[in-house]
Image (cartoon, rainbow, N blue to C red):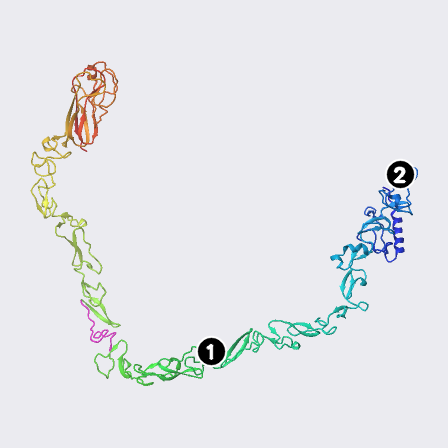
């Protein structure tokens, strides 16, 4: 794009500015600096060298078209009137002097409302061109002040000159502000005071006239009809007299007539001075008076100088001991003593402190002292002087002249009290601090309880608890009683017991009433083995001793005593309940069981008749297969062919007595192979039940035999 030279454009703008005068455009409006930033507000300022890169298009001339669309290519386009520019991209206005079509001309501004034509560039920029352009900014249907065009800034403002403002206002910074001067008068009713329009009827700075300021002490002033008055008071002050001259004249925090508020006077109290503190009424009592009942309505009702109940202060009752009190000048004094009492020290605080009925120093009256003979203490009883002995002394001879002649603390004849001689049993004694004290015990005696009342009460030669010395007790061994003889410990056997081994360690170790070796006395042996009550007894079957002809304790003996139960000793079967005596010499139960075989083929698992043995005692049994004809004694299942059989018992099982799983071809071979072993098995007791069973069709002959014998532990 082709651009005109900027120095020529600036020169043209300067010339245009000078031609317009006072920065007024050819169309009569100020230049809008905001809308045209490259045009100086004051064109008299040196603009300097413009920055081509930063300059807006306001300085750019519109580019001439390379080829005019409607003219021959060899003739340049030039307009002569606006109609020639119709439809041209450069603009619809003809600048006749140059023949160019432009957007606008300053002399004939065709820019839309709110814009103006920039001289030189002939372009429209935002901003006003005259006051008419600012009319659109008015609001409220024209009620707002008319807007004015500032041609220097191209902005719509409130005012440009003072004439644009209403009376009582000046144009300052394009704004109408309150003010006045010699050329601008104030509206009616206002006065021009120091450049401001003031209502001297209500303005506290010019009340009634200019520069006549209202001020009130302790408050804020107000101007009413040109006269100063009080508007508000500064707490706690108040305007109680309603006079503006002295302002808020009362401090309600301490004013008795206006305490807390105007006209709130503090009441007068009896015998008191009223006060106002922090806006609250109170009072202080006058000297010598107090408010003892706490009731403000009757003031300081008590005269503490004379009140016996409040003497010198509230609650200080004047009631001396043993006296009637009196309050004098606020001090408690004794009015009169009670009967038999005296104020002997003159001190009212303790009242009538002396009981003249018992005081030896004031017996019957103050200062009437009782006399004191030797070792005595004066005494007053019923207001009459008597004599009492000093502590530790007594008048044992009742002779008035020698006073309390006996010292009870040291006198052996009067130890602790008159007539109490200091003597102790089995020893010698002396009186120490009024107590009869042991000096020494007689030989063989001791004061073991430390009691002087019974002296040396223990004979150390015979006392088992203190044998030879106090506290040395003799120990009693088993079945014996301790004794002390000549100061040495010993013991004696209790009745029915004897020390047969002569050893003190086990005492009287033998019970002579039951001991077979020492029946009734040491060394007396009973042949029958029974000693009762210290006497040997003859042999019997109920004496729990094996004696006489009996086989075991109280049983056996070939009919001498009852038969013995299982497992007791025996010599033969006749000694035992079950008639059997084992090889070990113990009563047992023994039986032999024979189970007959089938004598013809019965088929598998066919049982024969049951063999029963009743009343078999419970316990462990030795079961032995007897060799006669062979034995099968088992519950083991054998092969189902050939010759095999078994003898099962319902409540007894001896697996060891079996043929096992051996198979025999002939009965003779089976009989020859049968075992004859022995097993020990338990039996619960009662009836034993056994029977014979063959397991194959065979011709069986004979029987199975076994023996059972009870085992003793």
The vertical placement of 676 against 43, above or below, is: above
The vertical placement of 410 against 150, above or below, is: below
Q: Where residue 578 sits in the image (x, y, percent)?
A: 12, 31
Query: Residue tagged by mark 2?
Result: 70
Per the image, is 55 magenta? Answer: no
Q: Residues within 10 Å of mark 1 (few under 14, many from 20)?
A: many
Rounded to the nearest whole Å, what is the CA distance between mark 2 and mark 1? 123 Å
Say which of 379 and 670 sits in front: 670
Magenta segment: 406-425
Residue at position x 10%, y 38% in the image: 554
Using the rendered view, name the quadrant where residue 591 is placed. Answer: top left
Query: Residue tagged by mark 1?
Result: 291
Q: Main secondary structure of the magenta part?
A: loop
* 535 with respect to 673 (left or right): left
Please tell me whether mark 2 sits on a helix, a strand or a loop: loop
* 233 with respect to 53 (left or right): left
The vertical placement of 418 against 472, above or below, is: below
Quadrant in which the C terminus is drawn: top left
Please tell me whether mark 1 sits on a helix, a strand or a loop: loop
């Amino acid at each position: 794009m082709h651009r005109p030279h900027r120095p020529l454009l600036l020169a043209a703008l300067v010339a245009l500015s000078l031609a317009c005068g006072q920065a007024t455009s050819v169309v009569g409006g100020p230049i809008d600096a905001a809308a045209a930033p490259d045009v100086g507000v004051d064109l008299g300022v040196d603009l300097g060298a413009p920055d081509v890169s930063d300059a807006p298009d306001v300085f750019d001339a519109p580019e001439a078209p390379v080829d005019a669309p409607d003219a021959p290519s060899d003739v340049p386009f030039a307009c002569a009137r606006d109609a020639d520019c119709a439809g041209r991209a450069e603009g619809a206005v003809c600048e006749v002097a140059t023949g160019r079509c432009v957007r606008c001309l300053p002399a004939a501004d065709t820019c839309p409302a709110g814009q103006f034509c920039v001289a030189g560039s002939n372009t429209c920029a935002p901003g006003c061109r005259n006051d008419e352009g600012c009319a659109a900014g008015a609001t409220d249907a024209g009620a707002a002040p008319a807007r004015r065009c500032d041609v220097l800034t191209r902005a719509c403002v409130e005012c440009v000159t003072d004439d644009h403002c209403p009376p009582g206002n000046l144009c300052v910074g394009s704004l109408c502000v309150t003010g006045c001067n010699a050329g601008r008068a104030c509206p009616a009713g206002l006065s021009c005071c120091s450049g401001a329009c003031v209502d001297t009827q209500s303005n506290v700075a010019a009340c009634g006239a200019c520069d006549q300021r209202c001020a009130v002490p302790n408050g804020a002033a107000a101007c009413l009809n040109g006269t100063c008055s009080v508007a508000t008071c500064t707490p706690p002050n108040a305007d109680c007299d309603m006079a503006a001259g002295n302002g808020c004249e009362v401090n309600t925090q301490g004013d008795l007539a206006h305490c807390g508020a105007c006209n709130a006077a503090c009441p007068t109290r009896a015998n008191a001075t009223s006060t106002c503190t922090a806006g609250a009424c109170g009072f202080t009592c006058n000297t010598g008076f107090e408010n003892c009942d706490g009731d403000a309505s009757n003031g300081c009702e008590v005269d503490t100088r004379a009140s016996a109940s409040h003497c010198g202060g509230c609650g200080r009752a004047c009631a001396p001991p043993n006296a009637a009190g009196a309050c004098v000048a606020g001090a408690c004094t004794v009015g009169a003593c009670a009967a038999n009492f005296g104020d002997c020290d003159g001190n009212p605080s303790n009242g009538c402190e002396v009981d003249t009925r018992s005081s030896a120093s004031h017996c019957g009256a103050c200062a009437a002292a009782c006399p004191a003979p030797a070792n005595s203490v004066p005494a007053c009883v019923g207001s009459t002087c008597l004599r009492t002995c000093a502590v530790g002394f007594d008048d044992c001879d009742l002779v008035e002249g020698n006073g309390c002649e006996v010292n009870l603390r040291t006198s052996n004849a009067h130890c602790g009290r008159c007539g109490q001689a200091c003597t102790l049993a089995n020893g010698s004694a002396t009186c120490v601090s009024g107590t009869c004290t042991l000096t020494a015990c007689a030989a063989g005696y001791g004061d073991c309880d430390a009691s002087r009342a019974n002296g040396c009460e223990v004979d150390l030669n015979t006392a088992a608890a203190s044998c030879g010395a106090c506290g040395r007790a003799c120990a009693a061994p088993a079945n014996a009683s301790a004794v002390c003889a000549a100061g040495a410990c010993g013991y004696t056997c209790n009745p029915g017991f004897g020390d047969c081994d002569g050893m003190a360690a086990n005492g009287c170790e033998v019970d002579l009433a039951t001991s077979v070796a020492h029946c009734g006395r040491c060394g007396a042996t009973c042949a029958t083995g029974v000693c009762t009550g210290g006497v040997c007894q003859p042999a019997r079957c109920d004496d729990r001793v094996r004696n006489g002809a009996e086989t075991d304790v109280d049983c056996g003996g070939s009919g001498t005593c009852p038969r013995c139960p299982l497992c007791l000793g025996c010599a033969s079967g006749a000694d035992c309940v079950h008639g059997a005596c084992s090889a070990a010499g113990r009563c047992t139960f023994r039986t032999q069981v024979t189970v007959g075989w089938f004598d013809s083929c019965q088929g598998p698992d066919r049982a024969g008749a049951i063999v029963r043995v009743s009343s078999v005692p419970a316990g462990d049994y030795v079961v032995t297969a007897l060799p006669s004809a062979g034995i099968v004694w088992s519950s083991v299942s054998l092969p189902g062919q050939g010759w095999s059989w078994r003898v099962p018992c319902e409540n007894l099982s001896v697996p060891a007595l079996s043929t096992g799983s051996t198979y025999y071809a002939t009965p003779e071979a089976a009989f020859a192979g049968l075992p004859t072993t022995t097993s020990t098995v338990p039996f619960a007791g009662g009836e034993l039940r056994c029977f014979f069973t063959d397991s194959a069709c065979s011709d069986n002959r004979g029987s199975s035999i076994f023996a059972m014998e009870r085992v003793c532990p």
